[in-house]
Image: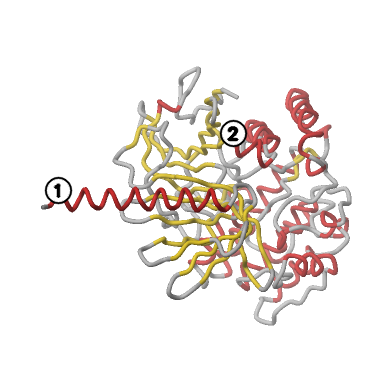
Amino acid sequence: MDTKVSDSKSPSKSIKPNIQDYVSIGSLGRGAYGEVILAQKKTDNQQVAIKVIDKKFLTREQKQYQVYIEREMLLYLKHPGVVQLYSTFQKPEKLYFVMEYLEGGDFADFLKLHKDLSFQTLQFYLAQIVVILEYIHSKGIAHRDLKPENLMLSKNGHLKLIDFGTSVVVHENKVPAEFLQKYKQIKSSFQTQEGSFINRASFVGTAEYVSPEMLEEEPCEYAVDLWALGIICYKMFTGVTPFNDSTQYLVFQNVKNAQLKIPENIPKVAANLIQQILVRNPQERLGSQSMADLKSHPFFKGIEWDKLFQMQAPQPKIVSVKSVEKSIDPDLQLGGKRKSKLKFYGVVQFKIGWFIYRPLDLVLIEGKEYMKLALYDPETEKCQLKIRLLEGVQVYSPSKGQMEIKDQNKKYKIKEVEHPIDKWLEVIEKCRKNLIKKKQKKQEKKQ
């Protein structure tokens, strides 16, 4: 997978880039897959985001296909609204994607932080998403996992689409022969191993943004992205998605029924746009026949489509919502001492409700003063919960295959999946003893 992407803005001019070309500034996020590191190129000090992927995780979760497809898609798609891939390379146990650093964070966090955005601001960002979709569709590609978490903000406040691991070629006659050949080779290599999600008529994506035809495993075209666009528009004005419910099953049923209720506080022109997009029949969705139909809707009145990515964004000052922690990747030269260590990780079933368990990635991290367990959503790779294992917190197994974590206020229940609970308890106890020894040594030095 070693490659240098030919681009004038690429931070690397070496024929064979490697991880030693960079100095780590810190970690932008972690999960069972690995982590995303904020790094600096040694030769020109340009900041980049390096996605470090554990090959064992890819094999275990059968996600090799998604990584290879994302690489080819990002090499193929070149647009100011698509994240830029600089280079990829690998080591025996890891894959590295060197990408442009988008310091504004993801659009989902941006919407949470700015709940009183003006109509003009929402109009601007929705228009940028339309332009991005128009571009990738013109190149024969459907993204299939469009959502605020997969839209990032650049320093100047413009949106960029990321995460092309589940994207597909819809029209082969729109893509270059060389790209199509690589795409088919990758698809053929992993078809048997990784199942039906590779096909256009298969379910991928996130429950609240997935289209009815994907749930029904009907052939999917560009209209799946338009459905997600309608969901995003609804959420931008209300803060919630239209078919959300207490369980994923109920969300799916709501999506299949497609019974849309528009709150009265949504501007009429926005409500009309949403109603014309969130239509059960994909062929009847606004924009499915021509994106020009979508762009001419009154909602976008006044938008200068050709200048969207050159003009100043309505919110020009983008403050990063991503906290930068010290990287835990040992292959990167660090700009400072590491403050935490990844000790153990694996998939577990985490109790979220009455007899309801959800598969999550559990990560044990050893800090300077205490340990913590972090739970990550395997789909979004976002942290769902952090549990500090402070003094007095009880970690035990009430029965075989189960683990409970109890503090003064709450009890967390976990079932084993990938590793036995006994192994988790063993590692946690080992880390606890290690921290006690470190504290004792500090005390002895002070004396």
Residue 295 — which label? none
Kind of residue at disc 1: Lys
Mark 2, other Cα within 10 Å: few <14 / some 14–19 / many ≥20: some
**331, 238: nearer the viewer:** 331
Query: What residue lies at 66% left-to-right and 63% top-to-bottom?
Result: 357
**117, 252: nearer the viewer:** 252
**179, 345: nearer the viewer:** 345
Disc 1 on helix, strand or loop?
helix
Say above or below: 251 vs 366.
below
Residue 360 place in picture, x, y as percent? 61, 55
Q: Quadrant of residue 226?
A: bottom right
Query: What residue lies at 59% left-to-right and 33% top-to-bottom?
Result: 55
The answer to whether residue 4 is visible is yes
44 displayed left or right of 381: left
Residue furthest out toward the bottom: 264
How many labels sit on residues? 2
232 displayed left or right of 95: right
Residue identifier under label 1: 445
**337, 446: nearer the viewer:** 446
The answer to whether residue 304 is visible is no
Kind of residue at disc 2: Lys
Residue identifier under label 2: 55
Residue 136 place in picture, x, y as percent? 71, 42
Residue furthest out toward the top: 15
Query: What residue lies at 67% left-to-right and 73% top-to-bottom?
Result: 354
Residue 411 place in picture, x, y as percent? 52, 70
Disc 2 on helix, strand or loop?
helix
Residue 235 place in picture, x, y as percent? 64, 68
Mark 1, other Cα within 10 Å: few <14 / some 14–19 / many ≥20: few
Q: In which quarter of the image is residue 249?
A: bottom right
Residue furthest out toward the left: 447
Question: Counting residues from the N terminus, which is met first, the one under dot 1 or under dot 2?
Answer: 2
